[in-house]
Amino acid sequence: MPEAPMEQQKATDYSVAENNNKTLEFIEDVTKEADDVQKRVLAEILSRNAHVEYLKRHGLNGITDRDTFKKIMPVITYEDIQPEINRIANGDKSHILCSQPISEFLTSSGTSGGERKLMPTIDEELERRSLLYSLLMPVMSQFVPGLDKGKGMYFLFIKSESKTPGGLVARPVLTSYYKSSHFKERPYDPYTNYTSPNETILCSDSYQSMYSQMLCGLCQNNEVLRVGAVFASGFIRAIRFLENHWSLLCNDIRTGTLNALITDPSVRQAVMKILKPDPELANFIEQECSRQSWQGIITRLWPNTKYVDVIVTGTMSQYIPTLDYYSNGIPLVCTMYASSECYFGVNLNPLCKPSEVSYTLIPTMAYFEFLPVHKNNGTTNSVPIPKSLNEKEQRELVDLVDVKLGQDYELVVTTYAGLYRYRVGDVLRVAGFKNSAPQFNFICRKNVVLSIDSDKTDEVELQNAVKKAVSHLIPFDAHLIEYTSYADTTKIPGHYVLYWELSVNGSTPVPPSVYEDCCLTIEESLNSVYRQGRVSDKSIGALEIKIVESRTFDKLMDYAISLGASINQYKTPRCVKFAPIVELLNSRVVSCYFSPKYPKWTPGHKQWINSD
Ligand code: AMP
């Protein structure tokens, strides 16, 4: 198997260039030998785990060849292994899925039964994740030279963690990574030289973390060559934070003293190493921030910025216009595609347009298979995934090197940490090839209708939540005739909007407080990732119900039919995105109501008693 590039130890120009070349060679090698690498990865996973309960139960009996594996092992979803996951969470340490000890659970933003999915992981997966990160800058440097001569201003955050009843930590994958020695004790590397000291990233208070990261970013403004966050939503939240706090931040910079609201001693200490009285810089920031227009604020405050590094593929594409506005059109760069289950791949052409981004799956990360997704009228099917695949469908899965250009597939992974033929839920389209490794456009996550940040709400969840909420209307003899939804990101934080058309037969009008109760009931019914975004991260605003005039949904249908929809097959969309449709709905709004308070949310699964 091609040797992975070593992490670099020294920062001389020579070693940077040498390391970059080694990394690019690695990518060249693994993509050339993609099929061989995949075969070996599968054999390695299966031979190491030959004796685990799950593989034995399915009768694999230590066999490691691809054909037998594909014949015997079922293609599964999370629900299929939930019993095994629950056993591990409850403290069963026997080799259920993996021969190596499960080190922790990664809590995915995908949910099952309203709770985050728990992905088992093992220590060595951290190395695989680090490897994928180490590919990013050598790739980028081919297109933007000199990035080793300055810093990256990245807004990175940890989220709360909890413990399973069996004592395993459960937390999001990035929290796990930032808290690991791979991140905290990384050797000096010009490519991981960030304006945010580790202490500010590792601070669990999101206000203090954001404030101190922004302050450090401003203090080092001329050194910053690239800016970013993981997702576009997070980066825009940081800019919004600046809009609300620049005056306090300038005060700190002018006087060289840190605002008393920052109480975490390690954060204070780390920031004070960077913060020096600089009235000139404070005046400059004040002048730029008090201008009426914030267009181009990024390149104005951080004048050497070459690009914005954020994911804008998938649902995040809704933020592209806002990012373009703030950044004056400098490139928006999507570097990688990853999940809690596994880190998948990198974008080898990072300066391409956001609409053209494709990710090359790195064949050493896991064993990948692809389930063809059949398109309806040129659009990817959005019907719910059937619970399990029949035998014929199982045979349709193809290997990494056998996917066809232009075809859509659902990604299926077999990982070192004990997922076997697991459906990730993402739909990808083959956009090209790097040697024999395919490059994929991210098309969508199956079934997701609404998303603001990392929340992913599907149609069924939305339907159930609405069903619960409308019971508040019964005493008023009011009934929901039709509804749809919209992820409104015109303001930060964005929020969910539901458009409701009602028939009101009772003589007493529905009081506003009842509609507000409906809003809250919907929020309470949505999954824990949504509620965490609302309550803890504050990345999602209060849910809104907009009551529309009668016959609005007839008008919506007329409009869809005028655009070519078939009258027989027309179904009210449960989510709208197309601007003219949103405008049509908004033009018929008679009243709006917001959720009056936060829904309930606590870290951990609702069935656990938190032990910390
Ligand atoms: P999580 O397991 O919570 O980290 O979420 C992983 C999911 O986020 C993936 O399965 C995708 O649906 C989505 N995701 C991750 N990276 C990207 C990307 N580069 N573009 C679009 N969606 C992404």
Image (cartoon, helix red, strand yellow):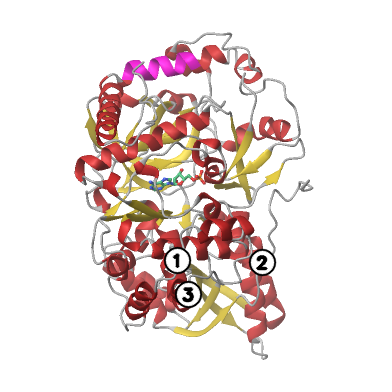
**Cα distance in 3D space between marks 1 and 2:** 42 Å
Q: How crowded is mark 1: few (under 14 residues within 10 Å), some or many (20 or more)?
A: some
Q: Residues within 10 Å of mark 2 (few under 14, many from 20)?
A: many
Q: Which mark is residue 189?
A: none
Q: What residue type is labelled 1?
A: Lys
Magenta-colored span? 35-44
State the SS at label 1: loop
The image shows a total of numbered marks equal to: 3
Residue 505, image x and y in percent? 62, 84
Q: Residues within 10 Å of mark 3 (few under 14, many from 20)?
A: some
Q: What residue is shown at x 66% (from left), y 66% (from top)?
A: 599
For marks 1 and 2, give the one nearer the viewer.
1
The residue indicated by pointer 2 is 599
Residue 480, image x and y in percent? 57, 73
Q: What residue is shown at x 57% (from left), y 80% (from top)?
A: 593
The residue indicated by pointer 1 is 276
In what quadrant of the picture does the N terminus appear?
top left
Please say whether residue 381 is visible from this viewpoint. no
Locate residue 162 relative to residue 192 in the image: left or right: right
| In magenta segment, residue 36 | yes
255 over 385 or under it: above or below = below
Disc nearer the start of the sequence (2/3): 3
Locate residue 68 relative to residue 83 in the image: left or right: left
The residue indicated by pointer 3 is 255
Please say whether residue 562 is visible from this viewpoint. yes
